[in-house]
């Protein structure tokens, strides 16, 4: 966690050519972080979060993670 922000700045969301979705932890919880340190990047990718979920959201709320992923993939897969 200590070094996450160091690598987060290296992500170039404009270089990603496919639709992208970030499903994150609740940003109101302590120590959570957004997909980027530059908030203008949030408009470049799809971003959702799960209320009351930490960075272990896939273990805490697996059904909700799957639901958000399927909602994202459905229009792409056609």
Image: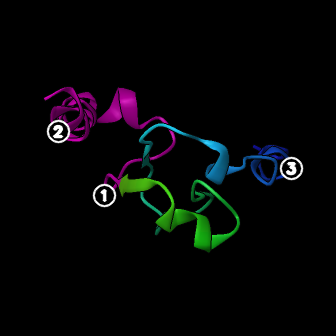
**Colouring scheme, one of rainbow, by chain, secondary structure, one colour:** rainbow
Q: Which residues are magenta?
A: 49-78
- On the image, the x and y values in percent for residue 68 come to 23, 41
64 relative to 18 in the view: left or right: left
Q: Which residue is mark 2?
A: 75
Q: In the image shown, does 57 or 65 lie closer to the viewer?
A: 65
Q: Which residue is mark 1?
A: 51
Is 57 placed above or below 37 here?
A: above
Q: In the image shown, does 39 or 75 lie closer to the viewer?
A: 75
* Distance from Cα at disc 3 to Cα at disc 1: 26 Å
- Label 2 vs 1, first from the N-terminus: 1
Q: Secondary structure at mark 2?
A: helix
- On the image, the x and y values in percent for residue 73 come to 24, 33
Magenta span has 60?
yes
- On the image, the x and y values in percent for residue 39 come to 61, 72
- Label 2 vs 3, first from the N-terminus: 3
**Dot 3, crowdedness within 10 Å: few (<14), some or many (≥20)?**
few
Tell me the quarter of the picture where residue 41 sits: bottom right
Q: Give the label, 2 or 3, closer to the camera.
A: 2
Residue at x 25%, y 40% (from the top left corner): 72
Q: Are marks 2 and 1 in contact (CB under 8 Å)?
A: no
Residue at x 85%, y 44% (from the top left corner): 3
Q: Give the label, 2 or 1, closer to the camera.
A: 2
Q: In the image shown, does 1 or 21 lie closer to the viewer?
A: 21
Q: Secondary structure at mark 3?
A: helix
Residue at x 77%, y 45% (from the top left corner): 4
Q: Which residue is mark 3?
A: 6
Magenta span has 34?
no
Residue at x 81%, y 47% (from the top left corner): 10
- Label 3 vs 1, first from the N-terminus: 3
* Distance from Cα at disc 2 to Cα at disc 3: 34 Å
């Amino acid at each position: 966690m200590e070094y996450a922000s160091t690598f987060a700045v290296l992500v170039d969301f404009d270089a990603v050519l496919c639709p992208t979705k970030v499903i994150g932890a609740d940003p109101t919880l302590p120590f959570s972080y957004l997909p980027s340190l530059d908030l203008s990047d949030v408009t470049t990718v799809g971003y959702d979060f799960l209320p009351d979920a930490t960075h272990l959201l896939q273990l805490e709320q697996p059904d909700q993670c799957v639901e958000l992923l399927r909602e994202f993939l459905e229009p792409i897969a056609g």
